[in-house]
Image (spheres, rainbow, N blue to C red):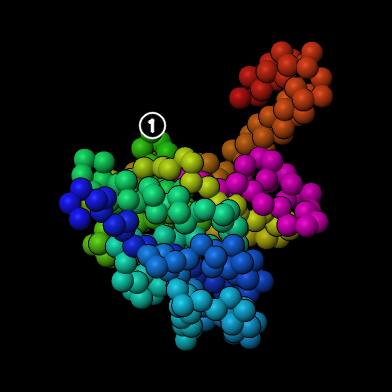
Amino acid sequence: MSGSPPAAPSLTVVVPTYGRAGDLSALLERLVPQLGERKSLVIVNDGSPSPAYDRVIAAHASPHLRYLVLPRNIGRGGARNAGAAACDTGWIVFTDDDCRPPPGWLDRIASLVARHDGGPAALDLIGGRTYPVLDHPPGFLSRVLACAGYHPNPVTVQGDLHCAVTAACAVRASALAAVGGFDPAYTTGEDLNLTARLTRAGYRARIARDWWTGHTVDASLPETCGRFFRYGRAAAQNAFALSDWSAHYFRTSMTLPAILRTIRRGMARRHARFARARFPMAERLAATAITGVV
């Protein structure tokens, strides 16, 4: 009918998973009810031999859900490419199996995609944000990392989006195909690499600061050390591949002094909020504490 608004663009969520059937079940509990006629989901089992996956998929069966099983483990970048190849929608949304999207998460990105699908405000990559979700009972290190803000979030440099994290990002399918998808050589840091290649190719990107998903923070010391080792290795890969200051920014943000500074700032902010809530007279002192640390 003349004057009616255009139909919202269709989108597909792609989730790679390996060895985390329990996390995937928690994700599907939140995500499957949000699926619908123009919102579908592809789960990519990245060669995990766990028999629990079949039970999880059966428990959350939906006509809008597809389940792909890769014959061998190829890494998250390759698994995301396999999922994207199975999509026939104009936009692809990426998230991780350890994320916890709130109600309305898919409706929110569908609204953003419709607003930026064409015209002067058109975008090709939209990066969302995450907030920490502590498993129960959380360990000391999990609480410290959550307080310090060490969970995946997009990176901006001077207002430009330099890394849309795959915990929450939406990309135009044609743009993703044009740059060859994710680089399968990356096991970590593939989102920084993809963002850089998209923006260098002239595609437009921005952060959606009000599109949030929960991300679990459940860390032991060996897991945390291993994760930051992988971050550093991926940053070095990107530094050689991209050879620009965005990779340098990412690399230097992962050094031990930078991590300790971030933890100290996070702890100071938490104590300041506690002081303002419990002792209104200490608000000025709390503000001074934050200013002194930052």
Dividing the picture into quadrants, the one containing residue 290 is top right
Is residue 269 shown above or below 110? above
Residue 93 visible somewhere in the drawing: yes
Is residue 270 shown above or below 7? above
Q: Position of residue 243 (x, y in %)?
A: 33, 48
Which residue is more in the foreground, 265 or 55? 55
Residue 172 lies within the magenta run: no
State the residue at coordinates (38%, 31%): 158
Which residue, given by chain and number where applicable, does mark 1 sit on?
A: 158
State the residue at coordinates (55%, 51%): 213
Q: Position of residue 133 (x, y in %)?
A: 67, 52
Which residue is more in the foreground, 125 or 91? 91
Which residue is more in the foreground, 186 or 3? 3
180 displayed left or right of 273: left
Query: Where's the C terminus, which quadrant?
Result: top right
Residue 132 lies within the magenta run: yes
SS class, disc 1: loop
133 displayed left or right of 156: right
| Outermost residue toward the left in this view | 2
> Which region is colored magenta?
129-154
Inspect the image, locate mark 1, and give the three-letter code of the amino acid beneath it. Answer: Gln
Is residue 265 shown above or below 131? above
Q: Position of residue 177 (x, y in %)?
A: 27, 65
